[in-house]
Image (cartoon, rainbow, N blue to C red):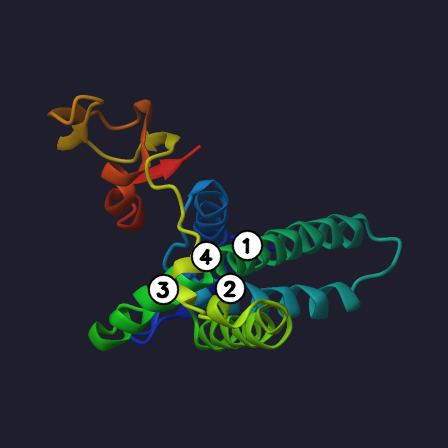
């Protein structure tokens, strides 16, 4: 893949290199794998890299099979495909595990146009919840006594643990990060650019989504 090649990206026709897009996608993949909650989707990056893969495959077809660049480019394509597939799979796993709170939150975000899910992911989450609800009503509850057949979907909801600790790196200097200690009292700390920390996820969740920190 030629890192100097420019790709058209986003509605304002900003031009970025394929290398920049790949690095951004790798970072999104890493953050998604290590974050306890689902993060805003990076579908534009995925679509951009899928287009780059097609371009690379066309270039490979022009090369001789004995050309060393053929095997190098094929390995690079395999690496990019793995990143994309694992990124999407990680998101689907979270949707299945936390489908109820994710859907509830996404419905609120749709009103403010701050969607975390792609349209396909949102449809998948809706169908997953519907299938789970039908299974509970038609298979499980039918075998229960009449007074135990009341079904409330939200009471089944599993929520991501936002209190878990994560290992992170500050991408810029950040002042005044508010942490809550075990006694319930707030503590304020500053993160120096390039510094690494183990902190509770919840206080740094917005910093992660804004690109100010990266999970490691």
Q: Are marks 2 and 1 in contact (CB under 8 Å)?
A: yes
Left or right side of 77 for 121: left
Q: Visible in this render: residue 62?
A: no
Q: Is residue 19 above or below residue 193?
A: below
Q: Residues within 10 Å of mark 1 (few under 14, many from 20)?
A: many
User: Which is in the foreground here, disc 4 or disc 3?
Assistant: 4
Near-viewer residue (199 or 42): 199
**Residue 1 place in picture, x, y as percent:** 61, 55
The residue that appears at 32% across and 23% down in the rendered structure is 197
Mark 4, residue position: 98
Mark 1, residue position: 87
Near-viewer residue (214 or 138): 138
**Residue 192 place in picture, x, y as percent:** 21, 25
Left or right side of 97 for 210: left
> Is tag 1's residue or tag 3's residue first in the polypeptide sequence?
1
User: What kind of element bears circle 3?
Assistant: loop
Q: Measure the alpha-carbon separation of dots 2 and 1.
A: 9 Å
The residue that appears at 43% across and 71% down in the rendered structure is 118
User: Which is in the foreground here, disc 4 or disc 1?
Assistant: 4
Residue 116 marker: 3
């Amino acid at each position: 893949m030629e890192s100097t090649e420019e790709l058209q990206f986003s509605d304002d026709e900003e031009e970025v290199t394929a290398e920049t897009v790949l690095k951004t996608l790798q970072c999104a993949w890493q953050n998604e794998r290590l974050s306890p909650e689902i993060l805003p989707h990076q579908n534009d990056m995925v679509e951009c890299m899928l287009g780059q893969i097609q371009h690379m495959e066309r270039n490979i077809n022009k090369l001789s099979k004995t050309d060393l660049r053929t095997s190098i480019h094929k390995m690079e394509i395999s690496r990019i495909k793995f990143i994309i597939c694992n990124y999407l799979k990680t998101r689907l796993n979270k949707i299945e595990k936390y489908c109820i709170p994710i859907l509830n939150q996404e419905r609120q975000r749709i009103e403010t146009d701050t969607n975390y899910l792609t349209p396909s992911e949102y449809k998948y989450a809706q169908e997953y919840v519907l299938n789970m609800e039908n299974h509970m009503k038609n298979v499980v509850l039918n075998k229960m006594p009449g007074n135990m057949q009341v079904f409330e979907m939200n009471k089944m909801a599993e929520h991501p643990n936002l209190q878990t600790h994560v290992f992170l790196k500050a991408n810029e200097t950040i002042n005044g990060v508010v942490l809550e200690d075990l006694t319930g009292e707030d503590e304020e700390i500053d993160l120096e650019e390039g510094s690494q920390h183990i902190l509770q996820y919840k206080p740094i969740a917005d910093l992660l989504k804004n690109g100010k920190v990266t999970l490691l």
